[in-house]
Image (cartoon, grey):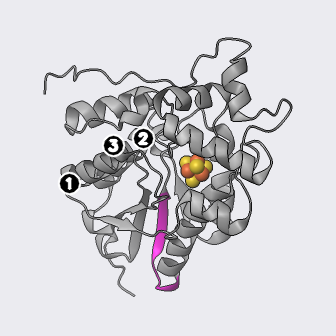
Amino acid sequence: MKQLPLDFAKRRVVVGFSGGVTSAWCAGWALRNYPRRDVVLLWHDTKEEHPDTYRFLREMADALRMPITERSDGRSVTDLFYDEGFLGNNQNAMCSRILKREQGERFVSDLMAQGFEVIKVYGFSARETERIQRAPTHAESAGYKAIFPCVEEDVSKQTCADWCNCTMGVKPSAMYEWAEHANCVGCVKGGKAYWLAVHRNHPDVFAQRSHMEDEFGHSILRGDSPVLLRDLVKRGLKRQVNPREAITIGPCECGD
Ligand code: SF4
C-alpha cells in the first residue's frame, strides 16, 4: 500500500497554551516543526487568571496567527471549591485536575477516537523533573506521545520570556512581575512567600481566600507547618525565600 506523505497524516500536535511564557514558546516551536494545520493551541479557562494573562493569550495567539481552542469546565476555581465542598490547598489542588488536566485528557481522547495520532506538547522546564518523569508513562498508557521542547532544546524560562517580548512583540503577563508562574491569582498550590506576595499585590484575592479558609474551617497552607493566611501575614516568613525560576520582565532588549 502507498504510504501517505507525513504532511497528510491524520495527526494533531496539541500544545497546552496556558498563558505562560514557556507554553507560548512551545506553540512557536510546534509551528516551526510541524505543519500549521496539525497544531492546536489548547486552553482551559479557570476564570481566575490574572486579567493580563487573558490579554497575553489573545495577543500571542494573534501574533502566531492561530486560533485558541478552548475546552473548559465552565466553573471558576471558587465555584468548584463550593460545589465540591472542598477547599483546594497546597497538598491537594484538585482544581488543577478538574479544570485543566481532565479537560485536556478528554480533548485528546476525543481526537484519538476520531483516528488522530496525538502528540502533546508540554511547556515544562528542566527543573520540573517529577512532572517530566510522570508524563511520558501516562501518555504511553493513554495512547499518545508527550514531548518537552524546552527541555529537549535546553531553553530557559528567561529565553522564552525574551522570545515573547522581543521576537513576537508580546509582553508576558503581569503575573510574572511578582509570581513565578502565570497561574491563577491566589493559586492554592502556592507556598508562604507566594501568599505574602498575593497579599501585597492582590489584597482583594487574598481576603477572599482567607474568608474561604474561615468558611471551610482549614488552611490552604497545610503540611508540616499549616498556617491560616491571616496568621501568616502577622507572622511573616522565618527566612528570606528566593523565588525559584524567577524571571525579569524588563524592557525589550532587542529594541522592538
Ligand atoms: S493555577 Fe492553581 S488555583 Fe488555578 S487551577 Fe491550577 S492549581 Fe488551581
* Labels 2 and 3: the sequence-earlier one: 2
Q: Crowding near pointer 3: few (<14 within 10 Å), some, many (20+)?
A: some
Return the residue at label 3. 52
Q: Which residues are magenta?
A: 113-120
Return the residue at label 1. 62
* Quadrant (top left/top right/bottom left/bottom right) for the C terminus: top left
Front label number (1 vs 2): 1
Query: Is residue 122 among what the camera can see?
Result: yes
Task: Report the Cα–Cα distance between label 3 and label 1.
Answer: 15 Å
Q: Are marks 1 and 2 in contact (CB under 8 Å)?
A: no
Residue 173 position in % (x across, y down): 35, 38
Residue 78 position in % (x across, y down): 58, 57
Closer to the camera in the image, 29 or 222: 222
Image vertical order of residue 10 relative to residue 248, above or below: below
Q: Label 1 amino acid?
A: Asp
* Labels 3 and 1: the sequence-earlier one: 3
Residue 152 position in % (x across, y down): 49, 40
Q: Label 3 amino acid?
A: Asp
Return the residue at label 2. 22
Q: Is 171 contained in the magenta span?
A: no
Task: Report the Cα–Cα distance between label 1 and label 2.
Answer: 17 Å
Residue 29 position in % (x across, y down): 34, 47
Ligand 1 within 8 Å of disc 2? The answer is no
Query: Is residue 187 among what the camera can see?
Result: no
Q: Could you say whether the residue bearing mark 1 is in a helix, strand or loop?
A: helix
